[in-house]
Structures are given as C-alpha cells and as structure tokens.
Amino acid sequence: MEFHYAPGATPLDPDEAAGLVPTHITTQGDLNAWEQVNIAQGDRWAARQKKRDLLDEGFIRELHRKMFNKTWQWAGTFRHSNKNIGVDWTQVAFRLRNLLDNSKYQIENHVYDADEMAVWFHHQLVWIHAFPNGNGRHARLMADLLAMRLGRPRLTWGGGEATINSVGVLRDQYLTALRSADQGQINDLLAFARS
C-alpha cells in the first residue's frame, strides 16, 4: 500500500506503513477519515485526565496511543528511524525529557504567558517529532490541553483540525508559522494558534 502525503506531512517507511491496524483502508482519504475518528476518541480520553501530569513522558506516549491505537500498531511508541523533520531518532527520549523539564520550570517561574507557553511547547514537540506519524496533531492537542490547564480556552489553530490537516491555504499558513518559529520568531505561530 502506498500513501501520498500532503506537503509538510511525515512520510512513513514501509515497516511503519505495515503497522496499519484496519485492513480495509486503501486510500489516503480513507486513512484520514479513520484517523480523525480515532483522534476524537483520544481527545475525549484526554479531557477526562484532569489530575494527570501533562508534562510527563508517560502521558505524552499514552495520549498518542489513545489518538492512534485503532489506526497504527506502533501508536504511542517513539520512532526508530530518521524523518524529513525532527531530531535524530536516538535523541527523541533525551530531547523530550529536556522539553518536559524546561516546560515545568517555565510554568513555575512564569517565563511565558499561558498562550505563549502552550504554543512554544507545541513548536518544540513538533520539532522533536517523537513518533513515526501524527506529531502535528498530537502536539496541537497537547498544546490545547496545556493552555486549558493554564486557565485559557483551547487554541483555535486557524479554525480547527479538520481544515489544518487538509492541503490548502490554512495548512500552508500553519507550516509557514512553524518555520518562522524554527527561526526563533514565535509570533506568527502564536497568532495562528488563536486565529
């Protein structure tokens, strides 16, 4: 089975693609629809985790698993290969630990306001790219959860997940804002997250 990915999407290597759970999926459209249902289940699970520490590797992995476990056998498992984005796969656990520790420090010391903290966290989580796929969607949900924990409403991401995952102007704006954040300019991503 061969999938054709939208610009900015992480391609799967053949071993990862072989990990597809549903056997009836034959097109990228079918996969997207199936994943969206699975992601909604993960979102509902996350909403019930009021007392869990969000900034914990176990929570990060469990959320990814809940978002993609009906889609991918490797859901919640760190990647074992390099991608077109992200840190070297051997550095994923180390970089994630640093991100979680730094985020806790920044929250405790009010380094950023709540929205900026959530968006900065999202950017760094995407940059690490811990999983074979689903990193952007996972990082956006993590940022939403973090924003809410910090007393803010969910981020809007230019109008919602259904539109940001599709090829088009909105996705291009998101990817451009991510690239600006890669250069240390978080304002475009912050504006996009609340647009």
Image (spheres, rainbow, N blue to C red):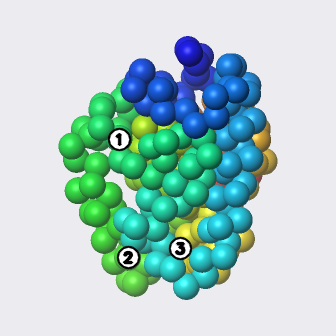
Residue position marked by numbered label 2 in the rendering: 104
- Foreground residue among 153 and 95: 95
Where residue 188 sits in the image (x, y, percent)? 58, 46
Residue position marked by numbered label 1 in the rendering: 79
Q: Determine which quarter of the picture holds residue 16.
A: top left
Residue at position x 39%, y 26% in the image: 15
Is residue 133 among what the camera can see?
A: yes
**Quadrant for the N terminus in the image:** top right
Q: Is residue 115 above or below residue 67?
A: below
Where residue 46 sits in the image (x, y, percent)? 62, 68
Q: Is residue 59 above or below residue 190?
A: below
Q: Secondary structure at mark 3?
A: loop
At label 3, counting other C-alpha atoms closer than 10 Å, the crowd grade (few under 14, some 14-19, many 20 or more) is few
Residue position marked by numbered label 3 in the rendering: 113
At label 2, counting other C-alpha atoms closer than 10 Å, the crowd grade (few under 14, some 14-19, many 20 or more) is some
Residue at position x 53%, y 40% in the image: 72
Where residue 74 sits in the image (x, y, percent)? 45, 43
Q: Is 110 left, or right, of 90 in this rendering?
A: right
**Mark 3 or mark 1: which comes first in sequence?**
1
Q: Secondary structure at mark 1?
A: loop
Q: Secondary structure at mark 2?
A: helix
Choose mark 3 or mark 2, whichever is in front.
2
